[in-house]
Image: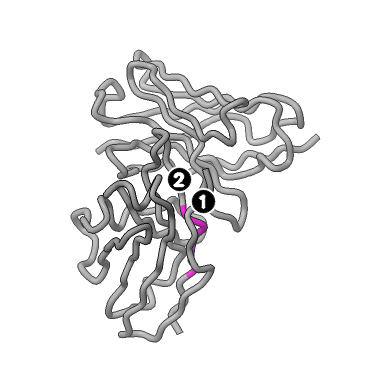
Amino acid sequence: QVQLQESGPGLVKPSQTLSLTCTVSGGSISSLSYYWNWIRQPAGEALEWIGRVYANGNTNYNPSLQSRVTISVDTSKSQFSLKLSSVTAADTAVYYCARGLGIKFDPWGQGTLVIVSS
Amino acid sequence: QSALTQPASVSGSPGQSISISCIGTRSDVGGYNYVAWYQQHPGTAPKLMIYDVSDRPSGVSDRFSGSKSGNTASLTISGLQAEDEADYFCISYSSISTVVFGTGTKVTVL
């Protein structure tokens, strides 16, 4: 059974870069059938898709975040990562990673809260 | 890309049926049969309920069904139960190789 787990700092200062890693266990991250997503959810608000990466490194990003986002994959470590630069308080959210197949996002990680504050 | 539009809240009594709409455009909901619905209870990760407009993953109750007409997708919950009280989000493939979520709907069981 595939499981995903987010990790990274829970507090980031404004203007700095948010960095998170998602570790995949119980299955292969190398299959090109799947893609690997980052999604976020500010408190009390809707989910927002950040972007995705395939095992071959190909990426797609939400146009509203594209200028600040980089998603990468390390198949040797069964991990994929998110970097979001120049963060502000508006980037405070629970960040989720999830496996994608078609329009199915399943499974999801448990989510990690990232607060942007000085 | 703009978020898909959902009603902020929908409510119903136990045993009733309710429907949640998800309004998009020809560039997302209307253009593809790639719409999914997720259920989210407070403090937990979303759970896949419907994919590819109307398919149900194994283990999801057949009280949940999905449909689409034009640019609008819908999730129907029949035989409403207390455990169905949660937030529901739609999601669709978009023409620029991206994915767009809905604004979310809070379902209340009266």
Residue B110 sits inside the magenta stretch: no
Helix, strand or loop at label 2? It is: strand
How many neighbours does mark 2 have within 10 angstroms: few (below 14), some (14-19), or many (20 or more)? many
What residue does disc 2 label? Answer: B100
Span of residues in magenta: B102-106
What chain is tagged by disc 2? B
Write the residue at 28% across / 39% down: A102
Q: Amino acid at mark 1?
A: Ala
Q: Is residue A52 above or below residue A105?
A: above
Helix, strand or loop at label 1? It is: loop
Could you tell me which quadrant the C terminus of chain B lies in?
bottom left
In the figure, is residue A85 to the left or right of B22? right
Q: Position of residue A98 (x, y in %)?
A: 39, 38
In terms of depth relative to the viewer, which is nearer, B48 or A76? Answer: B48
Write the residue at 36% across / 21% down: A78
Q: Are marks 2 and 1 in contact (CB under 8 Å)?
A: yes
What residue does disc 1 label? Answer: B3
Q: Amino acid at mark 2?
A: Val
Q: Is residue A13 above or below residue B78?
A: above
